[in-house]
Amino acid sequence: MADRVLVTGGAGYIGAHACKALARAGFVPVVFDNLSTGWAEAVKWGPLVKADLLDRAAVDAALAEHRPVAVMHFAALSLVGVSMQDPGLYWRTNVSGALNLVEACVAAGVKNIVFSSTCATYGDQDGVLLTEDAAQKPINAYGGSKLAIEGILRDFGAAHGLAHVIFRYFNVAGADPEGEVGEQHRPETHLIPLMLDAVAGRRPALTVFGTDYATPDGTCVRDYVHVADLAEAHVLGLRRLLQGRGDGVFCLGSGRGFSVREVIEASRAVTNREVPVVIGARRAGDAASLVCASTRAVSVLGWQPQRSDLRQMIGDAWAWAQKPGFAG
Ligand code: UDP
């Protein structure tokens, strides 16, 4: 029988793409998701346990029933802006949820966990190319909550032998090249889907959040990485754990930064349509520039990103944006 992997948040954008990659690699992804932001229709490659990580008994029951060889932990609230308005919600959901999960793993004898962390743990670092060893100084509650979970994993690793791979993602973009899943949030807050909605006429315009940052064109610079490439990295991280090759922290990005204006330019080139744009104020919690070097993932995991070219990512997102999407 194929090995099972419990995928928390597997009904969400990144989790669903990871499930597809897991299934292709021969695993059965068991999705654990409360469907607060995810979509039941995105669960296509294994069973769905509809439950909340804050419900410890439900986590215990899922681990007892499915006996996974590992857990991939994606489930979290992930909006920088909301985390600034309601930090309590972010700390409770993300940190208490993760703590329940790792305690349940220890109790059930699950020894491996792949964790979805973020470049938001770095804070604002003056445009330097970030590596795994850069200081982590989050400037928003979302990043703070993810950094706390990294600490929990290190402590549980030392005390209980819970082996872990931590991925710090930069800005995830694009959609499954075969169109089976894609990015759809409610409400949508992310740059590329909002921009493509404006291009498609589903919203009046894209608001650019600030043009007075200390970046070449004044708009924020981010490192965009294709969700399918990210999903492949998770399978490589899982294999590393299952082979007993030890803990690891890996940044996942493309190594190139693009400003909001450059993303808009790329969209024009890909879609052949104008992006209606309004210039707005800065969004609280946004760093000016976040770009990483993923050299460790490439050299240690053998990660080979295939689709993380900006136009390719926007092209895949555009193909998805033209489909009906999940009805929910
Ligand atoms: N952004 C923007 N308008 C929007 C949404 C995002 O200008 O409607 C900017 C945002 O300030 C950031 C970048 O686009 O610099 C990426 O934001 P997103 O929310 O997609 O991801 P984040 O960087 O917060 O993870």
Image (cartoon, rainbow, N blue to C red):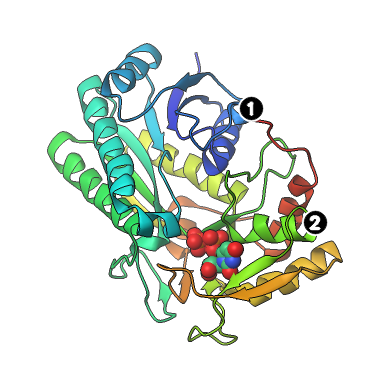
- Give 85 or 16, whichever is nearer the viewer: 85
Secondary structure of the residue carrying tag 2 is loop
Sooner in the amino-acid sequence: mark 2 or mark 1: 1
Looking at this view, is 108 or 118 the one in front?
118
Which SS class for mark 1? helix
Q: Is residue 302 left or right of residue 324?
A: left
The image quadrant of residue 237 is top left
Relative to residue 19, is residue 62 depicted above or below?
above
The quarter of the picture where residue 178 lies is top right
Tell me if residue 78 comes above or below residue 281 in the rendering. Answer: above
Tell me the quarter of the picture where residue 296 sits: bottom left
Would residue 9 be seen by someone viewing this image from the given angle? yes
Residue 300 image offset from top left, x and y in percent: 42, 55
Q: Position of residue 157 (x, y in %)?
A: 20, 41
The outermost residue toward the left is 159
* Residue 4 image position (x, y, % from top left): 45, 22
Q: Hey, what amino acid is under mark 2?
A: Gly
Instruction: Please name the amino acid that badge 1 sits on.
Output: Glu
| Residue 154 in the figure: left or right of residue 79 | left
Mark closer to the observer (2, 1): 2
Real-space CA distance between mark 2 and mark 1, rounded to the nearest whole angstrom: 25 Å
Which residue position holds label 1?
Answer: 41
- Which mark is on residue 201? 2
Q: Name the spot of residue 114 as percent of width and height, x first.
A: 38, 41
Name above or below for residue 129 compared with residue 237.
below
Residue at 33% from the left image edge and 43% from the top image edge: 94
Task: Characterize the local packing of mark 2: few (<14), some (14-19) or many (20 or more) Cα atoms within 10 angstroms.
Answer: few
Q: Residue at x 57, y 87 (%)?
A: 216
